Image (cartoon, rainbow, N blue to C red):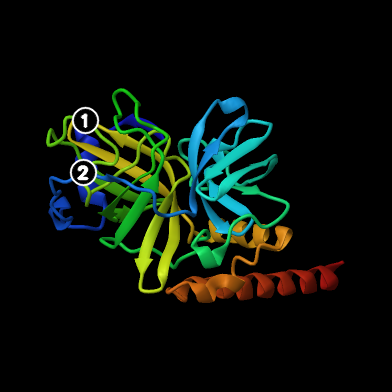
Amino acid sequence: MRLRALTYAGVLLLAACSGLNDMDLLESPVKQRVEITSEYPAIVKVVSPGGLGLCTGTFIADRAVLTAAHCTDRDGTYTVLSAFGTFQTDTIMNFGNGGIDDPNDLALLLFPEAVASPEAGQVIPLGDAPAALERIRLVGYGCNSLETRLGAGIKRTGTNQIYRITDYIELVTPLSDTSNNGRSLLGPANRAGSCFGDSGGPMLRETASGLEIIGVAHAGAWNDQYTLSQYGNLNRNDNLLFLRDASNDFDLNLFEACHLADSPGFCNAYWSYMQIFQFLKLVWTRLLRWFF
């Protein structure tokens, strides 16, 4: 995760522009901190070529890991470390450029054959559009201190509520001295945020039928009181179409698996976009025939 300074004026701007009346609408932080976990097998470490970087990723198909484009900006072989094996690939599909202001900061690591099992919980399906104040879960391998950047490589998890939805899905984490970690990943157990190494990691919705992924860790900002975590929104039209193209190009069946999710709206949105796309394509084709 990339960070930039968040001014006090910026914090006030958050409250003014969020669509919420006040940050007090968010749940008060508890004393418990985020926890180390060995669960969530679909969430994996992503190691850059030569071991020069660490990110987090999620198996969204049996042979595809979703992560951030700024995690896959080097040529070479990437290594995925999971509880069910170690896998390597040099086949990458980047969407955005991964810049700090890029809402399309998404990438896929692709394997030639299936390596993850949906039946064993090693694949997490795509979920429906997020909503402000919705409770979500974060999982990542990032650091546990923004100041020292230490502690990366250990899987941690916590929950939070979505603060607002702009070009990104945004979370606010209050910083306190309730832990001797100070600014620690991911903060209070119920107001978690992201840290260096969490880039590419998932924002998850917990449903009666299991987990769904709705966002990917992109960047953040902080000051002495708060951290702001930004996640790429998988339900943005352009991000959704990127996933559609990847699914078609590499036969990933991302949308055929929509029935696994508890939020059919994602699939409905997908098919709505596809119908509009096909209609516009037909109109354009006929116009070309008429005039040329």
| First in residue order: circle 2 vs circle 1 | 2
Residue 125 visible to an observer of this rendering = no
Locate residue 162 relative to residue 102 in the image: left or right: left
Q: Which mark is residue 77?
A: none
Q: Identity of the amino acid at label 1?
A: Asn
Foreground of the two, 247 or 222: 247
- Residue in view at x 71 percent, y 58 percent: 250
Q: How many marks?
A: 2
- Residue in view at x 72 percent, y 73 percent: 283
Instruction: Indicate the quadrant containing the N terminus: top left, top right, bottom left or bottom right.
Output: top left
Q: Which mark is residue 181?
A: 1
- 2 and 1 marks in contact (CB < 8 Å): yes
Locate residue 204 relative to residue 64 in the image: left or right: left
Foreground of the two, 191 or 292: 191
What distance separates the C-alpha of mark 2 from that of mark 1? 10 Å
- Residue in view at x 44 percent, y 64 percent: 212
Residue 157: percent from left, percent from top: 33, 48
Judge whether 280 appears above or below 53 on screen. Answer: below
Instruction: Indicate the quadrant containing the C terminus: top left, top right, bottom left or bottom right.
Output: bottom right
Residue 33: percent from left, percent from top: 21, 43
Judge whether 166 appears above or below 7 on screen. Answer: below
Which element carries disc 1, helix, strand or loop?
A: loop
Q: Identity of the amino acid at label 2?
A: Arg
Residue 22: percent from left, percent from top: 15, 53
Which element carries disc 2, helix, strand or loop?
A: loop
Residue 60: percent from left, percent from top: 55, 58
Q: Residues within 10 Å of mark 1 (few under 14, many from 20)?
A: some
Foreground of the two, 236 or 260: 260
The residue indicated by pointer 2 is: 33
Locate residue 174 relative to residue 124 in the image: left or right: left
- Residue in view at x 60 percent, y 47 percent: 95
